[in-house]
Image (spheres, rainbow, N blue to C red):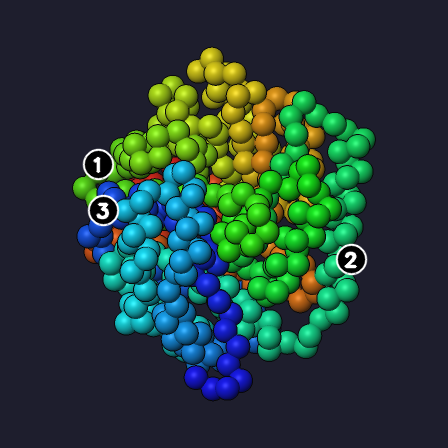
Amino acid sequence: MSTSFQPVIHSLLETDLYKFTMWQALLHRFPTNQSEYRFVCRNPPTFALATLADEVNQQLDWLCSLRFAPDELSYLAQLRYIKPDFVQFLRIFQLHRPFIEACAEGEHLVITAKGPQVHVLPFEIYVLAIVNELYFRRMAVPDMGVGRQRLKDKIQLLRDALAQSPRRHAFSLADFGLRRRFSGEWHDEVVATLKAELPEHFGGTSNVHLAQKHGLAPIGTMAHEYLQTFQSVGVQLKQFQKAAFEAWVQEYRGDLGIALTDVVGMDAFLADFDLYFAKLFDGLRHDSGDPFVWGEKALAHYAKLRIDAHSKRLTFSDSLDMPKAIALYQHFGDRVQTGFGIGTNLTNDVGPEPLHIVMKLVRCNDQPVAKLADSPGKTLCEDDTFLAYLRQVFDKHD
């Protein structure tokens, strides 16, 4: 490692909470799963990401040398839904370099993590943070005063809106911006600013390291990969969502009760989300499709099941900015509890155009898996035959 090397990731705690919660559940349920994750950039970058390959590999070498520190393990252990055996697993855990490869193919940066799922699942968030920060290090340093002013304007916009149009339920904001942040330093400043300026409305952050550092609640439950895993573990495909939710309920027994709805679309989700699950889960998370339509469908479903919507929470997290979050709050805030997870617009709104990068589960146990999101650009699968079959099973047309 050269003397000029500057690590992007300094702690294995610097990942999203839902990585730990999914990790624990899958370790307990499917410890022998084999899986493959791949990196994708969905928008055209300013320069070819392939030129970052060598630096990415240096960062991966460093990442795979890290271990959880005693104080980090103690922090995780005091979260009541994190179980002692999982903490002991993390005590000896280390990411293994042979399980991940990064290389240039033409102008494209190709990153693949392949191996035991409980060993390759954690790579995703670290890789996305690494690629983002290396990418923006190559650019001219922006005037961070611009970013600070934009953040200040968003805070003031929210204050004005809440003063003018209060609703029955409180406005709750969370930072979901680790994956596509401008830099770790800026992310830290954004979280500290939100905590100081919006103490009544800033509920916490998905970044577990920053939650520990700033005394905030770590926020997150499940992501698509958790439900997609159940497409490949011997469950009848039509039943995979029910199997995933049942396993979650058994693992967390009342904690972490926000269900993700768009792995095969909201309509297919609601068909599976019967009275049993609707009572057991505290609410739902939106991540694709029209959020207003989605929210109305959710409220209609609760009404159909004769469940008081005021006891439930709708969490919005799809490409949110502050004006959209405010509009959603004004629309739903008198009828249901709401939460708003804002990511890129908080942690990467400093001037340069952000990258739209993801690293997704593509295969598990040597079978393809897929997501049929309610937004066309978010559907992801490398096997057209399986994708067509999944559409047929859930009667979801392209």
Which sits in the foreground, 245 or 272? 245
- Which residue corresponds to mark 3? 30
Q: In the figure, 284 relative to 121: above or below?
A: above
Q: Secondary structure at mark 2?
A: helix
- Which residue corresponds to mark 2? 149
Q: Earlier in the sequence, mark 3 or mark 1?
A: 3
Q: Secondary structure at mark 3?
A: loop
Residue 283 at least partly seen:
yes
Residue 355: x and y in percent read: 56, 63
Which sits in the foreground, 144 or 301? 144
Which numbered marker is on residue 236?
1
Residue 101: x and y in percent read: 34, 72
Q: In the figure, 170 relative to 35: above or below?
A: above
Residue 315: x and y in percent read: 54, 36
Q: Earlier in the sequence, mark 1 or mark 2?
A: 2
Among the 4 quarters of the image, the one containing residue 226: top left
**Is 118 displayed left or right of 105 in the figure?**
left
Which one is in front in this view, the residue at disc 3 or the one at disc 1? 3
In what quadrant of the picture does the N terminus appear? bottom left
What's the CA distance linking mark 2 and mark 3? 47 Å
Q: Which amino acid, by three-letter code, is at mark 2?
A: Gln
Q: Which amino acid, by three-letter code, is at mark 3?
A: Phe
